[in-house]
Image (cartoon, helix red, strand yellow):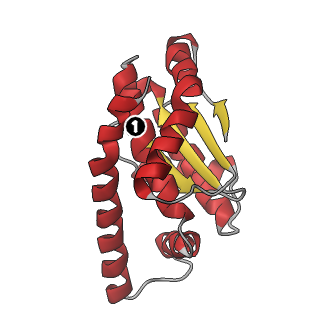
Amino acid sequence: MRISTDRTGRSECRAVQHIHTVAEQAKRLVEREMRARLCDPLTITVTDTRGVWALAERAERESVGLPSTLGQVLLGYLHRPAKPVFGRASVSGEGLLLLVNAEAHKDDLAEVNVTLVHELVHAVQLSAPGARAVRQAQIRSNYGIERFSRREAEAANRAIDRDEEQARSLERLAAQLA
C-alpha cells in the first residue's frame, strides 16, 4: 500500500499523518470483517475536492485505455456535484486508487477514519474476482464506448447500491482505529 498526497497544503498535514498511522490497521480490519483480501497494488491519495474528481476520472480513463489528458479530465468538472465528496475508490491502470478528501473533513480525524474504512470496503469489493472487469464495463458505458442495455444498467445500479450499503454498514469498524 502506497500513501501519497496531491493538492494538499499545511492545513491537511494532520489528516495525512493520521492516514499514514491508521491505514494498515484499517485495511486489516476490513479484510478480516469481509473475509476477503485487498488486491495489490493499492494507492491511497489524500487530496482536495477537485483532486478527488480529477484523479478518479483520470484513473478510470486510464484503466479502460482512454487518453487522460488534463483538458479531457477538466471537462468532467462541468458535470460534477458542487458538494464535496469525502472519498472515492476507483480502478486505475496500476491497480486500485483510494482517494480521501482531507479538505472535506476539516481536521476531524474520526471522520477521516470513517471515510478510510468506507473506501477500503469498496477497494476490497473491487478486488473480488471479476469485479475489476465489471467496473471497467461500467466505465466504458459511462463514457459512451459500449452502452449498457436497460437491463444491464439496472443490474449495475443494484450492484452499486448493494456495495454502498455494505460499505455504510462496515463504517462501524472506524471506531476501532487508534
Question: Seen in the image, is 66 located left or right of residue 89?
Answer: right
Residue 37, image x, y percentages: 56, 57
Q: Nearer the viewer, residue 167 or 59?
A: 167
Q: Residue at x 51, y 14 (%)?
A: 14
Choose top left, top right, bottom left or bottom right for residue 153. bottom left
Residue 54 placement (x, y as % from top left): 56, 45
* Residue 128 visible in the displayed image: yes
Q: Where, quadrant-wise, is the C terminus in this rendering?
A: top left
Residue at 46% across, 50% down: 32
Which of the 4 image quadrants contains residue 92?
A: bottom right
Residue 59 left/right relative to 110: right
Under circle 1, the secondary element is helix
Return the residue nearer the eye: 137 or 175.
Answer: 175
Residue 15 sits above or below residue 34 on the image: above
Residue for badge 1: 115
Which residue is at 56% across, 73% downward?
Answer: 129
